[in-house]
Amino acid sequence: QVQLQESGPGLMKPSETLALTCAVSGYSIRSGYYWGWIRQPPGKGLEWIGSIHHRGNTYYNPSLESRVIVSVDTSKNQFSLNLRSVTAADTAVYYCARRQYYYDRNGASDVFDIWGQGTMVTVSS
Amino acid sequence: QSVLTQPPSVSAAPGQKVTISCSGSSSNIENNYVSWYQQLPGTAPKLLIYDNNKRPSVIPDRFSGSKSGTSATLGISGLQTGDDADYYCGTWDSSLSAVVFGGGTKLTVL
């Protein structure tokens, strides 16, 4: 059974760099799949942050791309999110998830099929 | 302002059927597959429907999905109080080169 678990700082100050890690159990990241980060501000909807292939190819939300780096560490079976220069607008629950993606004549299928429980990150001075 | 438009809320009685709409455009829903997620209070989203109308094996057939043109619909029949949750549609947007989600619909089972 594949499980994902986020870990991170909880509370941060504006202008700092957010660093989150997602530990994967029950599956070896190097075996395949994409992995991704999604966030949800309090009382609001979901926002995709970025995704990474197990070989390291990355895809980012254009609205966050200038501040985001997603990386993978297959030796530790985990992947990470770095978001620099955070502000109060980055306050959210951050989820990691496994991404299933393919493309055929009907278009792209981009699905997050397994999610971590989420970790709350608050940015406040 | 979400790229995909969902009604903020819907409600129905136990045992009834409800539908939740998701409206987009040619750059997202019309030319890509749609997925739906259920988020129970205080928990992470869970995949309900993928590729417009397919269900993961653990999802009961009370949940269904469909797509027509630039809109998609989630249907839930035989409503139960445990279906009280927020529901999100999602898809790939070819113009934005991004995964996009609807703003979410809160389902209340009266």
Image (cartoon, rainbow, N blue to C red):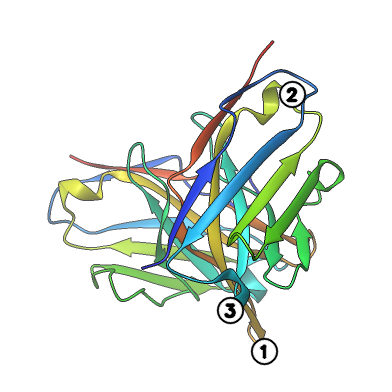
Image-based side of A75 in relation to B7, left or right = right
Residue at the spot 52% in from the left edge and 74% down from the top edge: B68
Which chain does the numbered disc 1 sit on? A
Q: Is residue A82 above or below residue A31?
A: above
* The residue positioned farthest toward the top in the image shown: A125
Between discs 3 and 1, the one toward the N terminus: 3
Nearest to N terminus: mark 2 or mark 3? 3
Mark 1 secondary-structure assignment? loop
Location of mark 3 (residue): A31
SS assignment at label 2: loop
Rendered location of residue A106, percent (x, y): 63, 84
- Whether labels 2 and 3 belong to a single chain: the reply is yes
Q: Is residue B17 above or below residue B26?
A: above
The residue that label 1 is drawn on is A105
Look at mark 2 in the image and give the residue it sits on. A87
Residue A36 on image: x %, y %: 62, 58
